[in-house]
Amino acid sequence: MPKILSLVHTAEVHSDTFDALRDRIAPGLALHHHIRTDWLDRAQVGMSPELAQEIRQTVQDSHQPVICTCTTIAPVAENAGAIRIDQPMMQEAARLGGPVIMAYCLESTKEPSLELLLYTLLMEKSQGTAHLLPLTHLWPLFMSGRIKDFHAEIASAIREKIDDFPPTACVVLAQASMAGAAALLTDLPVPVLTSPELALRAGLAQL
């Protein structure tokens, strides 16, 4: 019987991302994708009790480990038992032991991602600090389906802005949708951390 992971997405593109990762890392793994694009739209105007209950119910109705790939709804999904996609990435950032630049492209991502990063730095007893790099002006590229342009512009902005910050241990791309920019930043002197692969490996560890 194949091993199964469930994933909760608020953008359809993430199912392709995780299918490709599965094919490379764990070919025998079956993925069940739950795609709810409306959840992100609703969450951006506030996490209502009704939305929170829908998220919790979806996680709790799964009979296998669940990864929530949306940082905006991740705290609710995590409280229901899901793996939040950015947790393993934040743990890796904390282990590097220095200041972290956290880049993000969606305003509703800022608070949950920063809260998790600061908490993880504290729990890991890291000496690192967090520096924010908002790139919210690029989000319309993702929403219009211009994914390659989205990643290219993220990479360009990070390369342009990184010298404005104190020396750092790593750059964190807060959203799964940003992950493709990392391949364009291999020339940076510090690692650029992304969430999808680390989260998939965390899910595999729970099977």
Image (cartoon, rainbow, N blue to C red):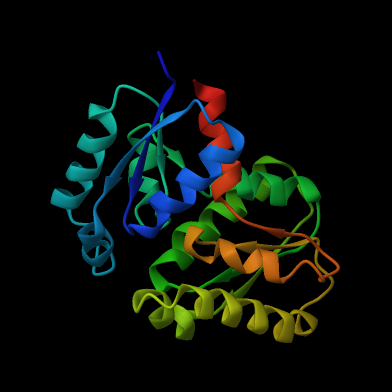
What's the residue at 62%, 69% (across, down)?
A: 181
In front here: 126 or 82?
A: 82
In the rendered image, the residue lying farthest to the left is 50
What's the residue at 24%, 69% (across, down)?
A: 45
Q: Would residue 19 appear left or right of 134 to someone viewing this image?
A: left
Q: Would residue 177 appear left or right of 82 to someone viewing this image?
A: right
Task: State the image coordinates of residue 17 (x, y, percent, origin top left).
Answer: 48, 52
In the rendered image, the residue lying farthest to the top is 1
What's the residue at 47%, 28% (across, down)?
A: 29
Task: State the image coordinates of residue 105 (x, y, percent, origin top left).
Answer: 48, 74
- Residue 101 visible: no
In front here: 173 or 6?
A: 6
Q: Is residue 152 above or below residue 170?
A: below
Q: Would residue 125 appear left or right of 37 to someone viewing this image?
A: right
Task: State the image coordinates of residue 31 (x, y, percent, origin top left).
Answer: 39, 34
- Residue 77 visible: yes
What's the residue at 24%, 67% (across, down)?
A: 41
Task: State the image coordinates of residue 39 (x, y, percent, origin top left).
Answer: 24, 57
- Give the image quarter of residue 173: bottom right
- Give the image quarter of residue 186: bottom right
Q: Is residue 88 above or below residue 106?
A: above
In front here: 53 or 20?
A: 20
- Give the image quarter of residue 98: bottom right
* Number of callouts: 0
Q: Is residue 196 above or below residue 184?
A: above
Q: Quadrant of the N terminus?
A: top left
